[in-house]
Amino acid sequence: MTKRLIAGAAVAAALAGGLVAPAAATAHPAVSWTACASGFECATVPAPLDYDRPRGPQIALALTRLPATDPAHRIGSLLVNPGGPGGSGVDFVQIAAPYFPASIRARFDIVGFDPRGIYRSSPLLCFDSYQQAVASLPALPFPQTPAQERLQRVADDKLTTACARHGGAILGHMSSADAARDMDLLRRTLGDRKLSYLGYSYGSLLGQNYANMFPDNFRALVIDGVVDPIAWATGRGDQARKTPVGTRIGSADGARATLGEFFRLCDAAGAGCAFSGDASRRYDALARNLTAHPATVQNPETGATFAFTYNHLIAVTLGALYAAAVWPDLANFLAALEAGASPAVLGDLLSRLRTGLGVTGSYYPNDVEGSPGVTCSDTINPRSFGAWQRAADENERRYGYFGRIWNWTWSACRTWPSAAGQDRHLGPWTTRTAAPVLVVGNYFDPATRYQGAQTAARLLPHSRLLSYAGWGHAAYFIAFNTCVNDQVSNYLITGRTPPAGTVCQPQGSPFAPPSALTKAAAATAATAVVLPPAVRDALTGR
């Protein structure tokens, strides 16, 4: 098994065929950019595996950048994280950056990086092949019954055992605190006196780590689609002992509220939504029917079929709620399921939904290990399997359809190796920063509920909350809302926050016919969304 970790050497040089002295890798390593995509440049920068041993083993941090279009008025680099955890910043920036607002593209080099342990940046690899990693996964996106929960436990234990045996040194150094230290190293390496940062979803946690650890080192920091950092790290009271991270961050609550908006707007659209007419009741009946009688879906690319169960319905619905631009496609698929359409028709409609969300069926080489590698490094979770089961039951009772899928999202954390020894930041989250932090929250976000943004804004004494009264996961660029884009772009360029209490209103309904420009931009934004692994699995029929 090949590991991209080289003791006492700068990995960038090692990958090029040579070694440099460790001391050179710990100062301000020079960046050697090379052309790697249309208009983009790529580079690899060495960073300490362990910041307590800066001259020790080094890892590789993979970067890409889209250079500023107006170099004469360039402010600096805008470092971007797309979320996950486990999302590739390199891929996100190469997909999305060309469509960022022109004012941002003019004034910043837009820089994406794969966080440590992810994809190209010294990835955590617990299996000999990706096929072995996929084979370790349970058959369903998430467990619904006690028997399925037992299968989930077996799969989780198989993953954590493989990581304990084969994960290597990076396994113990994947916390967001270490990634924040990497960001400060990249700030210096890129020649920026102060950091400019845009973090979505999990990237909001990375941003909050940075703001609290390096409060004087940034000029502008945007967190969008925000997770409550206390709920993430430890929970409140005795939650760390009783409640898994996926439940205590309240994502199921956000998903429930967003699904309610899908039903409301679909019914209001009438003939403009294929599932209109008491959509909530019809969805409930469909869910009950699939529990007893799974549908058959045929993959249009391969011709293979798979059983589409209640579990798949919930996972696919959750994925579609991430991007309001694909809600008409979700409605079409639900109507076809309800009508008992043929496997081929269902496969075509699911493929359209999958394409709209940018899910191709290809995965990062460490997709299986990467997300738990970060989450379990950051968070404290129950060690008792019974606690996970009880939390799943309670989350479903409180929040309905999405209670279980979110509860079990990071269930490998129950037995994750090296979690307790991580150099992680568990708080405080209330450091006063030199520059203001801009916190962006959607009213109806299926992954990071609005309360997360409200909490983060209350915790950070020098912050401003920008609200979007719309739908989907995250807002800036993703929602293609002019108000949000203008407010965030102005802050990134000038450092001035919007007026207190600013709420951006949505521009029409997801079911209203969009203009060609809006449709194209929304589709591009949707493909940049980082979805949970269980959702991607359901969309591809894996």
Image (spheres, grey):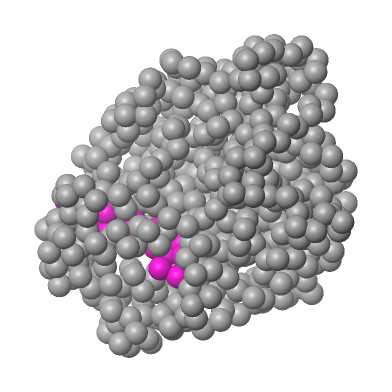
Picture coordinates of residue 90 (x, y %)?
59, 43
Picture coordinates of residue 291 (x, y %)?
17, 57
Residue located 76% across and 20% down the image: 25
Residue located 45% across and 32% down the image: 366
Residue closest to the eye, 258 or 395: 258
Picture coordinates of residue 66 (x, y %)?
68, 50
Rendered position, 383 above or below 349: above
Quarter holding the C terminus?
A: top left
> How many numbered callouts?
0
Specify whether residue 122 is in view: yes
Is residue 266 shown in magenta? Answer: no
Picture coordinates of residue 230 (x, y %)?
63, 47
Residue closest to the eye, 81 or 162: 81
Q: Which residues are magenta?
A: 306-326
Q: Is residue 153 left or right of residue 498?
A: left
Q: Is residue 303 left or right of residue 124?
A: left
Q: Quadrant of residue 280?
A: bottom left
Is residue 313 shown in magenta? Answer: yes
Quarter holding the N terminus?
A: top left
Residue located 75% across and 57% down the image: 69
